[in-house]
Image (cartoon, grey):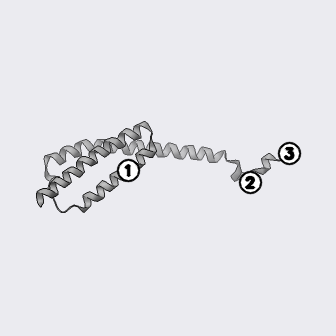
């Protein structure tokens, strides 16, 4: 049973690494819709990891190697996601600044002929 739990954990961690690589690829290309779908899939992998029985996979060399690969990618993903979010907020603020309907009720005051 212990060996099966370790193998299941190793498989999930490999999937997590693969999903992280894909996340990085799509955030770099600016394809946010696919990026967000992949985030949901990666969360599902984490949920499966939490459901596993106790195992000792975290004590193995393979686990340490996977973590060494994942950590820098996670940091880059977080940086790029924050950059995208800030840029998106700035664009939203700029659009709202030019939105005449919020200033003039229905916006019809601009269309009136005097």
x and y percentages locating residue 12 in the rendered image: 24, 52
In the rendered picture of this protein, how many numbered marks are placed on residues? 3
Q: Residues within 10 Å of mark 1 (few under 14, many from 20)?
A: some
Query: Tag 2's secondary structure?
Result: loop
Which numbered disc covers residue 39? 1
Q: CA distance from mark 2 to mark 1?
A: 39 Å
x and y percentages locating residue 81 in the rendered image: 42, 45
Q: Residues within 10 Å of mark 2 (few under 14, many from 20)?
A: few
Query: Tag 1's secondary structure?
Result: helix
Of the pair 42 and 89, the residue shown nearer to us: 42
Residue plotted at (34% across, 42% down): 22
Position of 110 with respect to 99 (left or right) is right
Tell which circle, 2 or 3, labels the residue nearer the N-terminal end.
Answer: 2
Position of 60 with respect to 44 (left or right) is left
Residue plotted at (70% across, 51% down): 101
Quarter that holds the N terminus = bottom left
Q: CA distance from mark 2 to mark 3?
A: 16 Å
Q: Dot 2 corresponds to which residue?
A: 106
Q: CA distance from mark 3 to mark 1?
A: 52 Å
Q: Residues within 10 Å of mark 3 (few under 14, many from 20)?
A: few
Residue plotted at (42% across, 45% down): 34
Q: Dot 3 corresponds to which residue?
A: 113
Query: Tag 3's secondary structure?
Result: loop
């Amino acid at each position: 049973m212990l060996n099966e739990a370790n193998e299941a954990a190793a498989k999930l961690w490999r999937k997590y690494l693969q999903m992280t690589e894909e996340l990085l690829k799509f955030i770099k290309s600016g394809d946010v819709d696919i990026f967000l779908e992949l985030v949901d899939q990666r969360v599902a992998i984490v949920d499966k990891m939490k459901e596993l029985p106790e195992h000792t996979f975290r004590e193995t060399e393979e686990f340490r190697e996977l973590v060494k690969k994942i950590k820098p990618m996670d940091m880059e993903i977080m940086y790029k996601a924050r950059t995208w979010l800030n840029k998106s907020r700035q664009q939203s603020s700029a659009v709202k600044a030019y939105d005449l309907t919020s200033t003039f009720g229905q916006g019809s005051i601009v269309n009136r002929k005097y």
